[in-house]
Image: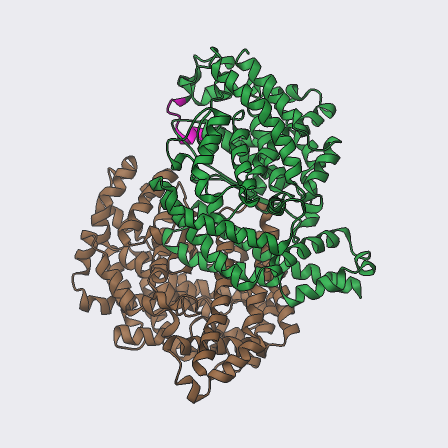
Chain colours: A brown, B green
């Protein structure tokens, strides 16, 4: 009896996931080359299917599955996949059911309106246009927190949306430590007389050659082209339709090859995660990365710990020189390595280097936390933002477009998302530390282009599980300890003290 | 009250059409570049959504809509779009409901099995492998005809699936006439001492240049790239996701530029049809071509009546020469025109020229008709096929791969489809004749590249209506008369007597 309900439940969920796969493909298509005039109708189709998935996730049928399968005697008979699936569906059901339907509808309308207002406000560098929308978005989210409830800190509930189990207590501790060490390090780097020469980075580098080089690197990194493809978009992304179809996109800047090369490798890290989730999770909500932070740990592992590593370029620099001989023939490997690792405080998060990046996140984390704790108000954000940039990075935005208005996230109502970026970075450093115990010749592997053992290490401990393990569980099982900021701090200190001869 | 049900009905149908749009995009993606290893899972998703659409088309809800909206008092209150939509849904409902579910399931399994057996049989040129499957497919279709009923001739029911309203009586008459005149014309052409020189057609012509030239031609033909895109596939096709997103694909043969150029223009004809269906039909089953034959009339109009016309090349030959100067610099426009219009009996339908093409269709039409009238049996097909080729085209297939096994259609259970190809050709010739009354300077328009009036003529009389008009209604309204084979006969006789100096 229970077994039969379990089967029906999994079938029901599989249908929802099929719809999601169709939606994802439509999304990918819209981004990569769908005809412009078809966008409106396609958006309607996406809306129609999304609505259907939402309905199914909150239907009476779903309620009945939860009611029948959750009691102990039933739950114990379920397969492991069914148990985790049930947990996910229950969480989703409760989250969605607790918000009154009318209120949610109003919120969806507000979101889409806010995003276009934000675009305008950013174009005009005028926060006052966006302010009333941001205020409403914050208000809505405060109400949602009340509906959903919270433990310890209201902001925890938002963190949990992106990083299940993460709390303000943990973040305050690790981010505090990180900030304490990074702010002075950045100051030292800025003051160093040993600044890298970078002018040669900005020579013209034809798109076609960048693409060819990217494809070669992807191949070596282990990205499986029989399970994916590389396309071009304004904003690069990776998207997993299922583990056998994980696509990435990149952007080519003919005046700065780093955009495409490091961007592609970053997305490759995301893609390798999705390509190696266990196939037995296909058709369930478990068949994706376990959290934004763990996902980002994989992309940053590949972008920073592999592709910004000296040994990686010891192997690949000669190849790059072949693709752009005029640009690099007179540049030594050492000079190249220092140039691609230049660190310099800047205003825009997405253009930041690996050293200063976490400080951009600190600013956002603190502002969000204080907003949802009622310690600051939306109207004061521009000034708070600018003050924090001055304090942490030593530079002050000259207008809101390059300040508080720079990111799209808040306009879509995404609060609690930003910390994942810095968390991912810390996870990555901690994974790297643990990996060295099993693969002590890590540097040599990079130098030889033998990247399979590295990818396999990650698959065995992280990728395969999809959402069946929570982020902090993954971290603990893979590294043997709780979240620890020291590894990232040590990595950055060692690396940048060497480069800047501090 | 009725108005409210009408609205619910249209909303219900819109959802089905949304699913269909998602399915079409997934289909396009599978053909144009989806990662290989993802195909299986994607096919499952397509299956899941298709099943949903099928369920909706035969649901109790659909039955209730039909019951409530069909009675005269209700029907009369409906909008025109709702009326036609209801008709389509009713037809579909009855067709699907009349076949017992189990039987249909068995048929679907047979279809997919038969297709792979056909592939093998074709590869081995061995009809005996395919024969038992073809026998079963024919048996199933005979039973379906009994379930659905028929008027006049059992085969009419199959014709109606692809060409609503078309009958054996009409086809016997027009095809008979066509065959009677074409067979001797082809014989004269073969015997003519004035055969065109064609060797220069087969020079290497790089793909990139073919693509650039194709894009230029598409632009001039009026294909709207803001509503479409051109990709590459093994088997070219056009697909309308909605009128604002109609994509085409082509194939490049570097040793024969005609494949891509004429193929692209052919698909462009299909695409122009779909791009110009009235937007008010979006979200209904009316938002597509009215029949296979009318669709084919548009592709053949562009491929043959425009792109194989002397005036078209008077305008475009110099451009082509620029793309491949070595290949064409010594070839006169006249020699080029004769070469691209070479007519020669051949065994393979899809490689046939415009003169012999209809005879390939005759063979298939007669075989299908006789099969479903019980006049011949599957086991005798290879010989009947070969005899007919010898009779009509003067050549005899040396094996079944280039004979009765060449087409995929029957392996998928598509009987009644083939006649559309020849019908489309006759429609096109008849449209051309009617168009000349309104656009007497047709040749001059081609010469000047002024193709808009031609496209507008077709849109006004054909494209815009989608499925709201039946094929023979379109034909009658556009040309003022019933189907008439004379126009095609006259076109072919005039053209080929000139080219071959008969």
Residue placed most toward the observer, A267 or B112: B112
Left or right for A325, reference A65: left
Q: Is residue A115 above or below residue A478?
A: above
Residue range in magenta is B202-210
Residue placed most toward the observer, A25 or B499: B499
What x and y, as percent, mark residue A444?
17, 56
What x and y, as percent, mark residue A249?
42, 51
Query: Residue at the front extreme?
Result: B375
Left or right for B192, reference B71: left
What x and y, as percent, mark residue A232?
43, 46
Q: Is residue B151 above or below residue A407?
A: above
- Name the residue: 49% across, 26% down: B391
Location of residue A393 by image quarter: bottom left
What x and y, as percent, mark residue B273?
62, 39
Q: Is residue B473 above or below residue A190?
A: above
Instruction: Please check the rendered image and state whether residue B208 is part of the magenta-colored stretch, yes or no.
Output: yes
Residue placed most toward the observer, A38 or B465: B465
Left or right for B90, reference B348: right
Q: Is residue A270 visible?
A: yes
Residue placed most toward the observer, A50 or B41: B41
- Name the residue: 55% across, 39% down: B418
- Rendered-image quadrant of the C terminus of chain A: bottom left
- Name the residue: 58% across, 66% down: A52
């Amino acid at each position: 009896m229970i077994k039969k309900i379990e089967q029906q439940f999994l079938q029901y969920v599989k249908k929802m996931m099929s719809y999601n796969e169709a939606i994802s493909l439509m999304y990918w298509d819209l981004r990569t080359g769908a005809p412009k005039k078809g966008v409106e109708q396609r958006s309607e189709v996406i809306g129609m299917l999304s609505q259907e998935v939402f309905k199914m996730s909150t239907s009476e049928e779903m309620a009945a599955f939860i009611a029948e399968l959750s009691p102990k005697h039933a739950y114990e008979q379920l397969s492991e996949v069914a148990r985790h699936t049930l947990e996910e569906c229950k969480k989703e059901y409760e989250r969605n059911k607790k918000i009154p339907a009318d209120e949610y509808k109003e919120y969806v309308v507000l979101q889409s309106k806010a995003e276009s207002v934000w675009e305008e406000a950013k174009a005009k560098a005028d926060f006052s246009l966006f302010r009333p929308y941001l205020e409403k978005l914050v208000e809505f989210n405060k109400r949602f927190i009340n509906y959903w409830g919270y433990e310890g800190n209201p902001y925890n509930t938002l963190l949990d949306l992106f990083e299940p189990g993460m709390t303000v207590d943990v973040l305050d501790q690790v981010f505090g430590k990180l900030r304490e060490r990074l702010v002075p390090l950045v100051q030292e780097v800025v003051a160093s007389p040993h600044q890298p020469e970078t002018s040669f980075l900005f020579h013209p580098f034809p798109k076609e050659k960048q693409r060819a080089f990217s494809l070669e690197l992807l191949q070596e990194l282990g990205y499986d082209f029989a399970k994916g493809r590389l396309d071009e978009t304004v904003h690069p992304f990776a998207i997993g339709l299922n583990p056998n179809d994980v696509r990435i996109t990149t952007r080519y800047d003919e005046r700065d090859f780093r955009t495409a090369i490091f961007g592609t490798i970053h997305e490759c890290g995301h893609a390798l995660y999705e390509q190696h989730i266990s196939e037995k999770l296909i058709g369930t909500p478990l068949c994706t990365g376990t959290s934004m932070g763990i996902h980002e740990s994989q992309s940053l592992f590949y972008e920073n710990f592999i592709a910004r590593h000296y040994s990686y370029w010891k192997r690949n620099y000669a190849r790059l020189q072949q693709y752009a001989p005029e640009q690099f023939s007179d540049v030594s490997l050492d000079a190249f390595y220092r140039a691609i690792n230049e660190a310099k405080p800047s205003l825009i998060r997405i253009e930041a280097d690996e050293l200063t990046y976490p400080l951009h996140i600190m600013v956002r984390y603190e502002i969000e936390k204080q907003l949802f704790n009622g310690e600051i108000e939306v109207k004061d954000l521009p000034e708070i933002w600018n003050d924090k940039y001055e304090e942490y990075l030593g530079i002050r935005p000259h207008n809101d477009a390059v300040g508080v208005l720079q990111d799209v996230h808040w306009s879509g109502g995404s609060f609690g998302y930003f910390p994942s970026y810095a968390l991912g970075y810390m996870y990555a450093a901690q994974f790297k530390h643990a990996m060295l115990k099993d693969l002590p010749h890590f540097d040599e592997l990079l130098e030889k282009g033998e990247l399979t053992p590295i990818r396999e290490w990650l698959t065995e401990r992280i990728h395969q599980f999809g959402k069946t393990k929570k982020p902090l569980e993954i971290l603990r099982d893979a590294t043997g300890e709780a979240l620890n900021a020291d590894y990232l701090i040590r990595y950055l200190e060692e690396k940048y003290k060497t480069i800047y001869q501090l």
